[in-house]
Image (spheres, rainbow, N blue to C red):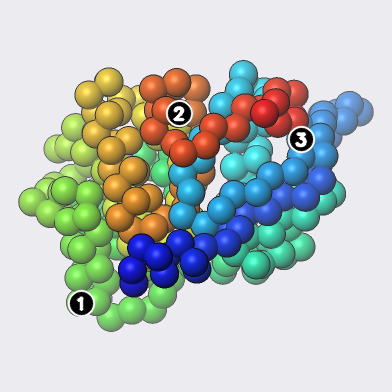
Amino acid sequence: MSEAEKGASKGTMISLEKVRKSFQRGREQLDVLAGLDLKIEEGSFEALMGPSGSGKSTLLNLIAGLDQPTSGKVIIGGADVGAMNEGQRANWRASNIGFVFQTYNLMPVLTAVENVELPLLLAKLPAAERRKRAEIALRAVGLEDRGGHLPSQLSGGQEQRVTIARAIVTDPKIIVADEPTGDLDRHSADEILKLLEKLNTEFGKTIVMVTHDPAAAERAKTVHRLDKGVLAN
């Protein structure tokens, strides 16, 4: 596909309309998102910033289909994710979302390639095909020579690369990243951010990243700032 064709095929990937999210804490209702509107185009790399408690992670969870809005619409890739039940959202996530968190959440008894294979177990693929796809994902993050290593034998930056390989092994449309560089030193953080940029520019992944790090946010094409449940910009 040419660059012109890629540009022509792009549209709105994420659309939130008047989204509210409230939680009950005892007798008190806690309003985390207050009528928020947001549109993110396909193939964009966007950062969410804001103080603690501003609603960043709540917003990311709604985009990822991990939670439902109290009211309003969450339309992702044309699917009304906010209206899905829990089982429907789980199936939708498996096909559309790749997750990268601050904590790597790798299984310590599994090798890197076995950790990357985990999301494919739901796809009922033959073992040889699972392994092939996991090895391709590891190659994409520059760890093709570390597939047989356990997480304890890897550096923090390498563990996060395995996490990213696991996130892309199902070829999701969207990668959601919650403080992906929060536990890393500056050099390792820069390497992870370069990798996310590559996934965005070369593989066309739509990326939504929560971060408190201005250096990380600079890598995004657009930065959204939240404050008390509303977008400040």
Residue 96 is situated, as x and y percent measured from the top left of the image, at: 50, 63
Visible residue check, residue 138:
yes
Q: For the image shown, how many numbered marks are present on the structure?
A: 3
Quarter in which the N terminus is drawn? bottom left
Where does label 1 land, which residue?
128
Based on the displayed image, in which of its 4 quarters is residue 3 positioned? Answer: bottom left
Residue 215 is situated, as x and y percent measured from the top left of the image, at: 39, 22
Sequence order check: which comes first, mark 3 or mark 1?
A: 3
Foreground of the two, 222 or 175: 222
Which residue: 27% across, 20% down?
186
C-alpha gap between disc 2 and disc 3: 21 Å
- Disc assigned to residue 217: 2
Position of 227 relative to 7 (above/below): above
Where does label 3 land, which residue?
33
Which one is in front in this view, the residue at disc 3 or the one at disc 1?
Answer: 3
Which residue: 40% across, 65% down?
4
**Residue density around tag 1, few if under 14, some if 14–19, many if 20 or more, within 10 Å:** few
Residue 117 is situated, as x and y percent measured from the top left of the image, at: 30, 62
Is label 2 in a helix, a strand or a loop? helix
Q: Are marks 2 and 3 in contact (CB under 8 Å)?
A: no
Q: In the visual, does 136 lie left or right of 164?
A: left
Q: Amino acid type of disc 3?
A: Leu
Position of 43 relative to 6 (above/below): above
Sequence order check: which comes first, mark 1 or mark 2?
A: 1
Sequence order check: which comes first, mark 2 or mark 3?
A: 3
Residue 221 is situated, as x and y percent measured from the top left of the image, at: 46, 39
Which one is in front in this view, the residue at disc 2 or the one at disc 3?
Answer: 2
